[in-house]
Image (cartoon, grey):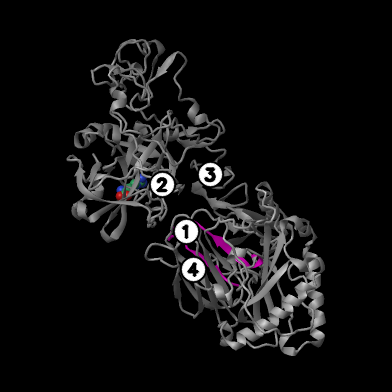
Amino acid sequence: MSDGQFEKSFLPDSNHTRKKRLKKRPRVAVIVTVVLVALLVLGAVAGVLYWYFTDSTNADQSGEQSGKVVRIYSGHLNLPNAQYTRQLENPETTDFKELAEKLEQVINTSCKNLDELSSYFVNSRVFDYSAGSGLMAYYMAQFEIPMEHKDILHKFSEDALKGALRRTVEVRRSFEDKKLTITQMTSSLTNPDLVMIPEDRTCYHTYHAKDTDMTFTSPGFNKDGYPNNIHCQWVLRADTDHVIYLEFLDFNTDDDCGNDFVMVHDSLSPAEDDVITKKCGKRPSSKHLSLMSSGSVMLVTLLSDENERFKGFSANFSQRVKMRECGRTLTELSGNFSTPYYPTFYPPNMNCVWTIKVLPHLKIRIKIEMIRMEEPGTRHGECTKDYLDIDGERYCGDHPLISVKIERPEAVIEFHSDESHTDKGFIGYYKAFDPRNPCPGEFLCGSGFCISTDMRCDGWNDCGDMSDERQCDCERDQFTCDNGICKPKLWMCDRVNDCGDNSDEKACECPKDHWKCQNGMCISANQSCDGHKDCEDGSDEAVCTNGVNICTEFNYKCGDGSCVNKANAECDGTKDCEDGTDEANCVPQCGVRPFKQQRIVGGTSADLGEWPWQVSLHYGRLGHACGASIISDNWLISASHCFMDQYNDPSKWLAFGGMNFQGDPLAQIRRMKQIHKHQRYNEETYDYDIALIELEAPYDLLPKVHPICLPDTSHIFPTGMSCWVTGWGAMYEGGSKSMSLQKAEVKIINDTVCSVVTEGQVTSRMLCSGYLTGAIDACQGDSGGPLSCREENGKWFLAGIVSWGEGCARKNKPGIYSRVTKLREWIREVTKL
Ligand code: ARG
């Protein structure tokens, strides 16, 4: 069913809505006497009401009583006795015209016999044909209902429509000329914006698929992107008994699906019931969208609005022999089953049944790793459209992992897809087991799964229900949580609740009447702010209100030499130094996200303008190679290791600002004037991994292109603080770069722990951030990019620069960043910032 976006009421001269009307083609009247296709029109009822009201209320409020609702229905008619010829693909041929006229007469006549509804009927058109048990003709019928007659809409009912269709087809069979016998017809609500009649075909292409790939692209794909306000169609056909496989290689359209999207139909009419999918936004090349038709035709539509321009798409298509059946009997001890063509979108109208049958003394475990069967309009938990049925239990929508234990040696699995909206589907695995010895040589989880014995008591929830982590004898280097689980001692006091009951974080506070130094040491409370540095790092004297003007490494030193006894006083919007130097040295407006008021491994796509200081550095024809951050209109900060050897040539680099998706035509591109690598950068240890880049011309600072604040040397980013790493780097170790900017939340890790887990490889110019449990981290290609931390005053500071790590997102191997506070003086020397 529709997602309700498309039905519009058409107000006179409303210029924000694309208008679509059927143009009348002058033609000879051919009289066809039989009433058919009555109520062609009524379709799709329930959804009709809500969109109607949304738009009609607008009209009422604006006093536009003369407005009307345009409603279009489309579908196909099946003529089993007619022959399909290539002539019928061309609307200029006599064959096309003659048949269209006859069918339109039939449709018109029946629409005019629709009693109450007939007066709203405007016209009908047959606009295309395809082969398929004789001939398929694609048509649409247009109705216009004046606002003041809106009550008539309540009279539509799907059952009435179905009944009328059946009756008229029966009547017709008995006395019509054989060639025009219609045996099947569909009719469904259609977005008027999607309808294209032959006279409208300015951006229209038709192709016949082959067994090998053919390609098409949206207009302007390799140039400025597709124009505003276009409507393009690609008609794809295949031989009979074949289906069409379509794969979008590049996909870059507006994020807002409202009036800018790509739609694929399992028919040549753009009816709601035949939608395979509707997509907008961007897709990384690592996540191709691939789809299948259920029959030998497919319709691809691109619609754009008047906003920004986008690159568009390129797509490959080919034909495949139609899968006649899917599903079978599975008798092996283990095996798998999946939706047809997985992970390509499954075709509409499929039914597969797998029967698992194993030896009578065995039982069965079934695991489905991911189910993707989202269909707009279905209510959660209601699996009436596409579904997977495992032994009587139905699943639909999206699910991460499903595991089912069948207490019998037999199970029936069924997959069903209806005629509209398809998705990736699923792949499932099964394994037979002997209930007397369910996990030979392995550990039996509470969930019925088996895992390798060495996964037991390793601090990881491998079973999924924690059963492998209970009743463990903790090792010497492990901490025993209050709930009996063992966790590596290193994970204690990292402000991450690893135990699940927070017991690993409880013992970290200093005893009562004690003060906790920045490095974790405890001192007696009265030693803080007594004018003496009692903590090794002096943090006990940093934030004192008693006027003792102590300068520790945690205090901001004003221009006049005095110190501010307040944490992170610089650039916080409050004048703390008498001479105002704490605010005077900031890049104006740094660290705010004007656009957003309110790869990274394990991250998610960033929103446009969310990280306005993030820059993508492209090297020659290599494309994106490193990240960087904007610190002023003409200075970027990045990592030294990005610019070694031949990469040291500033003329080979381009800096893309204001970009979210690689290839965004709206990015601000700048050349580099000079690359300043830190003179002490050590290629072996990555010490001093920082570089400053002077741009040939400054960026235009806009909401989407904006500097981040540099922290003063005294700035504290405490252990456990949540910061964000962003970049276009690999999505997993060894993976490919991401097309869209990724973000991940990471935590600042305690320096001692950092040193232990890196076996002493970190220097004071480095800091660790991420999770000791792994799974979330920066990765190859993120280097040089920012580790951004938000301070309480809402401003973002650059705590680190992505530098190195052992692999990506590995357990006990967090990301290592260049520590900006320690390199702040050098930044000032080079940039004067
Ligand atoms: N050196 C890498 C690069 O050039 C960055 C690696 C960061 N690794 C990590 N696990 N955090 O992109």
Q: Which residue is mark 1?
A: 253
Ligand 1 under 8 Å from disc 1 Cβ? no
Amino acid at pointer 1: Thr
| Residue depicted at 59% across the width and 54% down the height | 439
Which badge, 3 or 1, comes first in the chain's sequence?
Answer: 1
Q: Which residue is mark 2?
A: 809
Q: Which residue is mark 4?
A: 247
Which badge, 3 or 2, comes first in the chain's sequence?
Answer: 3
Q: Quadrant of residue 66?
A: bottom right
Q: Count the marks.
A: 4
| Residue depicted at 77% across the width and 64% down the height | 158
Marks 2, 4: nearer the viewer:
4
Q: Are marks 1 and 2 in contact (CB under 8 Å)?
A: no
Determine the CA span between mark 2 and mark 4.
Answer: 31 Å
Q: Position of residue 767 (x, y in %)?
A: 33, 36
Which badge, 1 or 4, comes first in the chain's sequence?
Answer: 4
| Residue depicted at 57% across the width and 82% down the height | 91
Determine the CA span between mark 3 and mark 1.
Answer: 40 Å
Q: Position of residue 352 (x, y in %)?
A: 66, 69
Q: Considering the image in quadrants, where does the C terminus appear? A: top left
Determine the CA span between mark 1 and mark 4.
Answer: 16 Å
Q: Position of residue 24 (x, y in %)?
A: 63, 75
